[in-house]
Image (tube, rainbow, N blue to C red):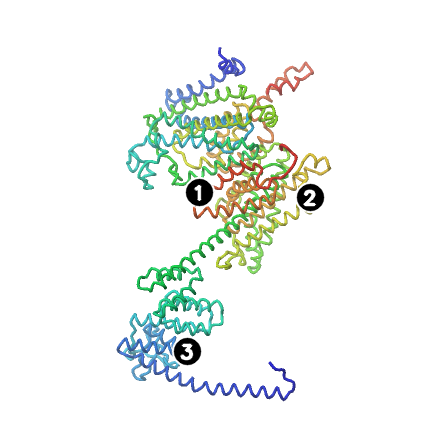
């Protein structure tokens, strides 16, 4: 745009623009009037005896694309279009029990009421005309102002492709601004061209446009064309190729889907297993009550949710998770420290007895929760920002799964940083490597044990918060995760965070890949068998800690 | 007297033998007589349901004894012993299913009801032979034995010890539970095997059959006890104890740790299998929940309560814990898990040698208290070496 240097120039420009506008309006007005006249004529033409002529009139109306076309055609389809005896106008009549409220079909103006149905001669439509109207209305919606309506019209055109829709669709594609709607319209157009009787080259081009999707409707359409004897050989071959391309794409997407579901299952396993990995690593003991720490975390979430519901306005309800996470950590962590100080430290050096004692604690905790909250499942609601789903590369991902994957990774990163950079983390690593040497260097091993146990249990509690978002909260919740998280730890290597990460994700993903092939139960069995064989080769797990301790 | 009888006589002395014999006779003779010979109204009459309950406890006792052999003596805590028990039970269950013949709901002489229900047209190959009791009796030993051999060989060979061993045995029983839940496995899926009619031609609903099963259980338990006794007092038993206390030292001394542990594990699995096979006809059902890991851990607490490494202890432990279970689940079910949980904690914290250890302690106290005149207490070291 050239730059305007003087006020005179500006005035000239404004004048020129005004003039142009006035001219444009002046040119448009008679056109509008002509349209209205043609529309009125076309509406009149609907009142015919012969259905064939009626059909022609419907086509003419649809071709006009007048703003009033849609209400008139809808009324015809619904049997609400009448000729009013007396005024001889064509009206739309809505029956409200005893009278008809009339609207002028051509102008849309209110035409009073009519109580006698004898005065109204219905303009009848048959099923052929109704189908025709439906398609015509679909084409009309293609030019609607609302993108959602255009989208659904394009969808409809795609699901019932017919050569009739080609002109409307081509026009709509030209005019379309929204990229998503345009893509769908192009596919609908291609589908219509494919169904039409156009040139072979055109139909093959249409097939190629369609091959670029995963849409089941398009796959069905192409399959139909590929198997249709009446269709020319080259088109059929192209369609068959396209079906194959779609199938490949679907297979790739399926792998992606499994991968993501596996990651999501794996991240839950990861959350459940990292606490176990560090307690096992530092103290050499198995905490069979670990699952119950997860359960306590989930119940803490439930309680926090109930408190939020009861005392705070609903707008802040979505924030309850932010409170639940530290609360669950504190509750489970406190129980963990109490367990360690009260029982486990007296069993120092006797891992099998520790295993049994912690199992006993798990039974007590389960029964305690059952006595307090009852044996039935408790519901924990997802906050709004965690419900819904996200489309990514043709995969639909639920928001809560994504949140859990990110959350698990964040917890892992936080824990790794804590172990790496804090002084307590240093102490923990020292005790993991060689307890007696660490003790000799003045590290308070008792304190380290208590804090490790608290930390591990606290993380389990946090895992409970995550699990409460995807599963029911019940006293047996922890039991479902305990065997799996042990396997993760055994597979990954005791005391290794990276082992837990690799173990959890590989188990989660392998499980998801085996499931469609072998069924959920068999998949689990195969994974168990695999792990039993795996620890033949690497008894200390994938990421074994190196150390000089010969036997712990 | 040959070496074997001498070793069996190594039940310390004649007194020990008499005690074992009297206990066995007491259970095997007195209880049935009190049940069968006395009228129901008589104060000493033992009702049949009590006989059945005792029979069940004795099966558990046998299972605890089996676990004690690997845990108490070889130091390997198996948390999958319930699997061997359940396998023995399934083997017996298959025999009992075949005995039903055409008396099932569908009246099909060829197929058990659940297979008819699943539209199977013929008996799977692994159901062949279970019409014969002799075959079944052999399989009761072989099926758990083979599983224990393969699993134990894989585990002990790669020196999986301690809690690792516990976890993978737990995983084993968990995997089997999942597998047996599947209908395709051909073991009745979720419902398992049930609706048994008769065993060896005796109707299972008759009281005399129930008492007979009970007596068989007592005798098998006695036999298992003697077998275990024989093993632990043998040279191999010494090696097992040494493995428990210092595995690598035993290995350095040139013993086959793998072989010794494997032997104990397989024998133990077989005893567990027999216990399961006796259990199923007495309770009338076997289903996959017997494989659940929780069941297997419970066996460990029976053994621990009685006193592991004592053989007699686990029998005592299993019977007393299960008696307590029957009592609590009848009187106050919600208390039972609190009780069981506390039992786990208390026994591991305060009674590492279980009830048997407690008796020993009390006896020693008594002995120490008696000669008040002599100021020097008995040296503790000698006690330890005998223990």
Residue B365 visible in rendering? no
* A180 sits to left or right of A93: right
In which image quadrant can residue A205 be found?
Answer: bottom left
Callout 2 crowding tier (Cα within 10 Å): few <14, some 14–19, many ≥20: some
Classify A133 as above or below A396: below
| Chain identity of mark 2 | A
Q: Nearer the viewer, mark 3 or mark 1?
A: 1
Q: Nearer the viewer, mark 2 or mark 1?
A: 1
Residue at the (48%, 52%) spot, across then down: A255
- Residue A3 location in percent, x, y? 63, 82
Point out the tag, 3 or 1, that comes first from the N-terminus.
3
Label 1 sits on residue: A522
- Residue A57 location in percent, x, y? 32, 78
Marks 2/3: CA distance? 75 Å
| Chain identity of mark 1 | A
| Chain identity of mark 3 | A
Marks 2/1: CA distance? 43 Å
Residue A228 visible in rendering? yes
Label 3 sits on residue: A67
Callout 3 crowding tier (Cα within 10 Å): few <14, some 14–19, many ≥20: few
Classify A307 as above or below A177: above
Label 2 sits on residue: A424
Query: What kind of element bears circle 3?
Result: loop
Query: What kind of element bears circle 1?
Result: helix
Residue at the (37%, 35%) spot, across then down: B193
Residue A2 or B192: which is nearer the viewer? A2
């Amino acid at each position: 745009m050239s730059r305007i240097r003087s006020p005179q120039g500006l005035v000239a420009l404004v004048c020129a623009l005004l003039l142009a506008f006035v001219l444009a309006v002046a040119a448009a007005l008679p056109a509008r009037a002509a349209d209205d006249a043609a529309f009125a004529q076309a509406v009149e033409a609907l009142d015919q005896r012969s259905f064939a002529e009626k059909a022609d009139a419907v086509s003419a109306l649809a071709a006009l694309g007048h703003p009033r076309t849609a209400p008139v055609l809808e009324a015809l389809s619904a049997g609400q279009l009448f000729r009013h005896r007396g005024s001889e106008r064509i009206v739309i009549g809505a029956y409200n029990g005893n009278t008809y409220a009339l609207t002028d079909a051509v102008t849309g103006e209110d035409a009073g009421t009519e109580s006698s149905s004898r005065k109204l001669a219905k303009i009848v439509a048959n099923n052929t005309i109704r189908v025709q109207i439906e398609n015509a209305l679909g084409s009309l919606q293609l030019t609607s102002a609302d993108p959602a309506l255009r989208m659904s019209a394009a969808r409809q055109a795609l699901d019932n492709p017919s050569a009739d829709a080609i002109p409307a669709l081509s026009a709509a594609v030209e005019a379309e601004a929204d990229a998503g709607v345009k893509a769908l319209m192009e596919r609908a157009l291609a589908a219509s061209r494919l169904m039409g009787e156009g040139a072979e080259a055109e139909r093959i081009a249409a097939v190629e446009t369609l091959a670029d999707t995963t849409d089941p409707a398009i796959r069905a359409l192409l399959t139909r064309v590929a198997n249709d004897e009446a269709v020319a050989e080259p088109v059929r071959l192209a369609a068959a190729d396209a079906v194959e391309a779609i199938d490949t794409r679907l297979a790739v997407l399926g792998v992606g889907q499994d991968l993501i579901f596996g990651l999501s299952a794996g991240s839950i396993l990861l959350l459940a297993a990292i606490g176990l990995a560090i307690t096992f690593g530092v103290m050499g003991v198995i905490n069979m009550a670990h699952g119950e720490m997860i359960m306590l975390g989930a119940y803490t979430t439930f309680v926090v949710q109930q408190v939020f519901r009861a005392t705070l306005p609903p707008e802040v309800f979505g924030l309850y998770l932010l409170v639940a996470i530290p609360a669950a950590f504190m509750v489970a962590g406190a129980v963990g420290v109490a367990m360690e100080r009260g029982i486990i430290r007296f069993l120092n050096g006797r891992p099998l007895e520790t295993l049994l004692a912690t199992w006993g604690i798990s039974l007590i905790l389960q029964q305690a929760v059952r006595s307090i909250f009852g044996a039935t499942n408790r519901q924990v609601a997802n906050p709004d920002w965690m419900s819904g789903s996200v489309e990514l590369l043709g995969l639909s991902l639920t928001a809560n799964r994504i949140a859990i994957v990110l959350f698990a990774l964040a917890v892992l990163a936080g824990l790794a940083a804590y172990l790496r950079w804090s002084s307590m983390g240093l102490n923990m690593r020292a005790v993991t490597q060689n307890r007696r040497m660490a003790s000799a260097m003045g590290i308070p091993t008792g304190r380290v044990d208590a804090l490790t146990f608290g930390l591990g249990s606290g993380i389990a509690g946090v895992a409970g918060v995550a699990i409460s978002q995807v599963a029911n909260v019940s006293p047996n919740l922890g039991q479902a995760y305990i065997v799996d998280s042990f396997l993760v730890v055994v597979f990954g290597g005791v005391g290794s965070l990276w082992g837990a990460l690799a173990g959890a994700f590989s188990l989660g993903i392998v499980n998801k890949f085996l499931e469609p092939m072998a069924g959920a139960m068999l998949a689990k069995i195969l994974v168990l068998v695999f792990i039993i064989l795996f620890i033949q080769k690497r008894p200390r797990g994938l990421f074994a800690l190196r150390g000089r301790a010969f036997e712990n | 007297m040959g070496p074997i009888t001498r070793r069996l006589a190594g039940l310390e002395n004649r007194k020990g033998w008499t005690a074992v014999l009297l206990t066995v006779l007491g259970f095997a003779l007195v209880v049935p007589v009190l049940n069968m010979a006395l009228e129901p109204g008589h104060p000493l009459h033992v009702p049949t349901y009590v006989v059945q309950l005792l029979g069940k406890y004795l099966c558990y006792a046998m299972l605890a004894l089996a676990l004690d052999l690997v845990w108490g003596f070889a130091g390997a805590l198996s948390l999958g012993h319930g699997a061997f028990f359940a396998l023995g039970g399934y083997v017996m269950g298959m025999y009992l299913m075949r005995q039903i013949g055409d008396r099932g709901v569908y009246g099909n002489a060829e197929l058990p009801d659940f297979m008819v229900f699943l539209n199977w047209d013929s008996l799977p190959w692994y159901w062949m032979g279970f019409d014969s009791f002799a075959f079944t009796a052999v399989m009761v030993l072989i099926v758990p034995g083979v599983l224990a051999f393969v699993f134990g060989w894989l585990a002990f060979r790669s020196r999986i010890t301690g809690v690792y061993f516990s976890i993978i045995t737990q995983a084993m029983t968990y995997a089997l539970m999942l597998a047996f839940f599947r209908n395709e496995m051909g073991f009745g899926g979720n419902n398992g095997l049930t609706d048994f009619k008769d065993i060896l031609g005796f109707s299972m609903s008759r009281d005399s059959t129930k008492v007979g099963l009970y007596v068989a259980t007592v005798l098998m338990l006695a036999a298992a006890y003697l077998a275990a006794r024989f093993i632990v007092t043998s040279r191999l038993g010494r090696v097992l104890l040494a493995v428990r206390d210092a595995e690598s030292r035993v290995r350095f001394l040139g013993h086959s740790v793998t072989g010794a542990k494997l032997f104990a594990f397989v024998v133990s699995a077989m005893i567990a299998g027999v216990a399961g096979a006796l259990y199923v006809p007495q309770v009338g059902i076997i289903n996959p929940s017997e494989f659940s890991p929780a069941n297997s851990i419970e066996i460990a607490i029976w053994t621990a309560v009685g006193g592991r490494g004592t053989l007699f202890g686990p029998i005592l432990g299993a019977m007393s814990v299960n008696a307590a279970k029957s009592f609590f689940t009848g009187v106050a079910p919600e208390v039972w898990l609190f009780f069981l949980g506390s039992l786990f904690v208390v026994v591991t914290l305060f009674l590492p040698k279980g009830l048997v250890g407690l008796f020993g302690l009390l006896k020693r106290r008594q002995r120490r208290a008696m000669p008040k005149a002599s100021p020097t207490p008995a040296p503790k070291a000698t006690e330890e070496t005998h223990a």
